[in-house]
């Protein structure tokens, strides 16, 4: 079983620091089911590839009782696909051999840990028991481009039967620890099997490895079921705990403003500015991404120009508040047909977001981890591609106006960052250049001649 991992990050040999495996050495590791070898087929400043080769001993598996007795025929324990395909054996090898990278540690180059890298993974034989579409549904929402070609069961009889085996390549810009985590969890799900006993400790492992992405993945129920070998009690426990803890990335804490913002009525000014920008764009079908508890949505409903309004939010509790705020249960049918609330995340590709004229993100992006911004950019500007995007975010320059806010602090504890005007414009200009948009910058709130406005707004047009 072979896995190759390639990067074109420069210098590409930085991959060796992250994996804690030197490109000039061939290393061999003894595992309970065979041996694993790590080597580098190529290692140049422009391109570096690390390979993990598993040499699985099928006879040893039987002797160690690692596989259950086969029910189909007497030799199933000895004649099977385990030595040749990516499976839970690969997950164990990743945790054992690339454990430091998997856990996001790098002593020699800590700056690389949170750096999204251009990465490509190749798996020559990956079992996909639920079909090729399932493979795309698992990895594309995580920001990967998926290429898969079926492998014939018998090269002499390619039409003998439909093959569950695919040669797969995954490409994307990811932190290495995220990529390894996705493989660790999803490869056994695709195989729909595990070679070891699954108990309560597997629920804890799933929650740990799924932190930050599983809660809002469109296929989280199937992922949970496959990872836990379809054991109902464990699945119910895992899903309940996922719902209880939620996602560590809440896209909006819209109702928790600073005292200074509240005193100037800044939130209402922001919402009105966004609604006006959407109206001026000429849009009729609009998205409120990260809609929180729905404060912008009533303003949009007041405009008859908007015939199709969608509010998307990652937190179920916020969606429930939005529903109550809008009084959806008593709303007249004509109005009700204009609006819908959906559960989803800005970090996953979602077909439901395609085809809209405009999208608004009011005080949203600062709640995203900086390392996840490239994924968010692709989801919104590359995949959803609304004609107009309206984004507001705090202006860090203006924080000096508030003496009650300690220097260097952000306005809300859930903010992962706050940009100065130059930082926001640098980010927006780069996004426009990459994805074919132009942008106008508009102030929101009272504007200081030196520090600018408290809120900065960018109106992107494609």
Image: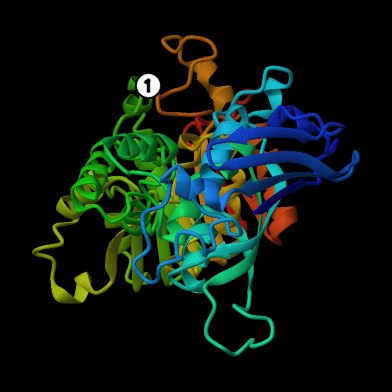
| 386 vs 116: above or below | below
**Which image quarter is the C terminus in?**
bottom right
Q: Position of residue 82 (x, y in %)?
A: 53, 57
**Does 142 sit left or right of 241 as displayed?**
right
Its colouring scheme is rainbow
SS for tag 1?
A: helix
Is residue 98 among the parts visible in the rendering?
A: no
Q: Position of residue 166 (x, y in %)?
A: 60, 69
In front here: 435 or 82? 82
Residue at 15% over, 75% down: 333
Quarter of the rendering containing residue 317? top left
Residue at 58% over, 59% down: 85
Q: Position of residue 45 (x, y in %)?
A: 90, 38
**Does 218 sit left or right of 145 as displayed?**
left
Quarter of the rendering containing residue 50? top right
Q: Position of residue 431 (x, y in %)?
A: 68, 50
């Amino acid at each position: 079983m072979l896995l190759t991992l390639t990067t074109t990050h420069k210098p590409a040999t930085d991959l060796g620091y992250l994996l804690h495996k030197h490109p000039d050495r061939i290393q061999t590791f003894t595992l309970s089911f065979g041996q694993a070898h790590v080597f580098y087929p190529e290692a140049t400043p422009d391109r570096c590839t690390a390979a993990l080769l598993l040499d699985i001993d099928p006879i040893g598996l039987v002797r160690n009782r690692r596989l259950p007795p086969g029910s189909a025929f007497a030799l199933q324990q000895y004649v099977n696909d385990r030595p040749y395909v990516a499976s839970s054996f690969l997950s164990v090898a990743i945790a054992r051999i690339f454990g430091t990278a998997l856990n996001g540690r790098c002593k020699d180059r800590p700056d690389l840990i949170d750096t999204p890298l251009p990465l490509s993974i190749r798996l020559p034989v990956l079992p996909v028991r639920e079909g090729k579409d399932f493979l795309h549904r698992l990895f594309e929402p995580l920001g990967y481009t998926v290429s898969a070609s079926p492998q014939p069961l018998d090269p002499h009889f390619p039409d003998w039967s439909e093959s569950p085996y695919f040669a797969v390549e995954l490409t994307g810009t990811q932190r290495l620890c995220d990529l390894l985590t996705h493989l660790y969890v999803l490869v056994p799900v695709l195989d729909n099997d595990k070679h070891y006993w699954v108990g309560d400790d597997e629920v804890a492992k799933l929650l740990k490895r799924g932190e930050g992405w599983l809660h809002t993945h469109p296929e989280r129920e199937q992922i949970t079921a496959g990872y836990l070998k379809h054991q109902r009690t464990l699945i119910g426990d895992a899903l309940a705990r996922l719902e209880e803890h939620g996602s560590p990335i809440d896209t909006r804490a819209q109702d928790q403003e600073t005292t200074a913002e509240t005193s100037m009525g800044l939130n209402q000014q922001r919402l009105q500015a966004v609604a006006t920008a959407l109206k001026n764009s000429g849009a009729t079908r609009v998205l409120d991404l990260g809609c929180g508890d729905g404060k912008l949505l009533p303003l949009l409903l007041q405009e008859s120009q908007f015939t199709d309004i969608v509010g998307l939010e990652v937190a179920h509790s916020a969606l429930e508040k939005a529903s109550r705020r809008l009084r959806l249960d008593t709303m007249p049918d004509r109005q009700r047909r204009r609006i819908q609330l959906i559960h989803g995340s800005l970090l996953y590709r979602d077909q439901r977001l395609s085809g809209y004229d405009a999208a608004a993100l009011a005080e949203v992006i600062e709640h995203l981890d900086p390392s996840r911004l490239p994924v968010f950019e692709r989801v919104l500007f590359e995949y959803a591609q609304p004609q107009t995007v309206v984004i507001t975010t705090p202006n860090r320059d203006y924080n000096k106006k508030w003496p009650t806010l300690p220097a260097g602090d952000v306005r809300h504890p859930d903010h992962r960052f706050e940009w100065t005007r130059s930082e926001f414009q640098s980010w927006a200009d780069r996004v426009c250049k990459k994805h074919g948009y132009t942008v106008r910058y508009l102030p929101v709130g009272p504007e200081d001649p030196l520090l600018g406005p408290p809120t900065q707004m960018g109106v992107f047009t494609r």
